[in-house]
Amino acid sequence: MLGLEIFVHSVRMVLRNLKQALQISVVPALLGGVLVFGLFYLFDIPFEDFDSGTTGFPAGVTSGSLAMFLVCVLAVAMIVVFWIVVSWHRFVLLEEYPSGVLPPFRFDRILAYFGRVLLLGILAIIVMLPASLISGGVMQASVVIGFVFWIVMVAFLWIGFYRLSPMLPGAAIGKPVTLPEAWQATAGVNGQILLLVILSLMFQFLMQFLAGLLMFIPIVGLIVVILLVMLILPLINVSILTTMYGVFIEKRDLAR
């Protein structure tokens, strides 16, 4: 079953390349954290004043400065995430091994990747708006039917995303894939993609459950949870997109 094969291959891809996964992700993530920490001082925002009991702006902080701070934090987070993701795609598909403490920073590929993500997001919004209105009307008539409609809508969105997902690795490696090309290349596998989505969600829930149990183990448990939740799980999701590109665009054999 192709959906199962893609999922298993993606998990193995991360596990057998843990060294490269660490090289690609750890230092950029730490660098991003340092930059965010520095933004607090750049905008003169006392981060210690932000807690669950905060009801307004801390002294000296205006809505404008806070808005600019949040925009900068979002920009840093997005650049770091796309830096890691693009580097992982290139490592797997082009065998571009990381060297030194930082993976190559390819701004043009990061920008192209962001553009494809933005396009997919806009398409999702275009589909979601009328579907949500219909779902609301159906829900008023029958909660059960409305819930079923909502489940079908979410499944449709996930299938659509994965069918168009080869656009993302293609942007990362400089071999663009258009919307029609991605849609045509993944034709006839809706059922397998749905299986892939279900397996991925089940695996995520299982890992989150195990992470919750490991949190009770002092120090070692925390380290394992950080590696699991912040490194392995995200890279497995990225590896699924990489595998989709390899299978449907490059026609790679998963047995290799």
Image (cartoon, rainbow, N blue to C red):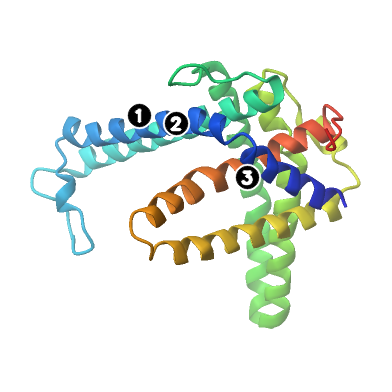
Quarter of the image for residue 167 reads: top right
Q: Tell which circle, 3 or 2, labels the residue nearer the N-terminal end.
A: 2
Residue 98: give its label: none
Residue 226 located left or right of residue 52: right
Q: Which residue is mark 3?
A: 237
Name the residue carrying label 2.
80
Which of the labelled discs sits on residue 31, or is there none?
A: 1
Q: Residue at x 63, y 39 (%)?
A: 14
Query: Is 163 rendered above or below residue 112?
Result: below
Disc 1 versus disc 2: distance between alpha carbons? 8 Å
Q: Residue at x 59, y 57 (%)?
A: 204
The percent position of residue 213, horizontal first and vertical second, equals 46, 66
Q: Secondary structure at mark 2?
A: helix
197 sits left or right of 62 in the view: right
The x and y percentages for residue 91 are 63, 24
Tell me where residue 161 appears, x and y as whole percent.
70, 45
Image quadrant holding the C terminus, namely top right
Which residue is pictured at 85% across the width and 40% down the height? 186
- Residue density around tag 2, few if under 14, some if 14–19, many if 20 or more, within 10 Å: many
Q: State yes or no: discs 1 and 2 in contact (Cβ < 8 Å).
A: yes
- CB contact under 8 Å: marks 1 and 3: no
Residue 203 shows in the view: yes
Q: Quadrant of residue 32?
A: top left
Circle 3 Cα neighbour tier, 10 Å, few/some/many (<14 / 14–19 / ≥20):
some
Residue type marked 3: Asn
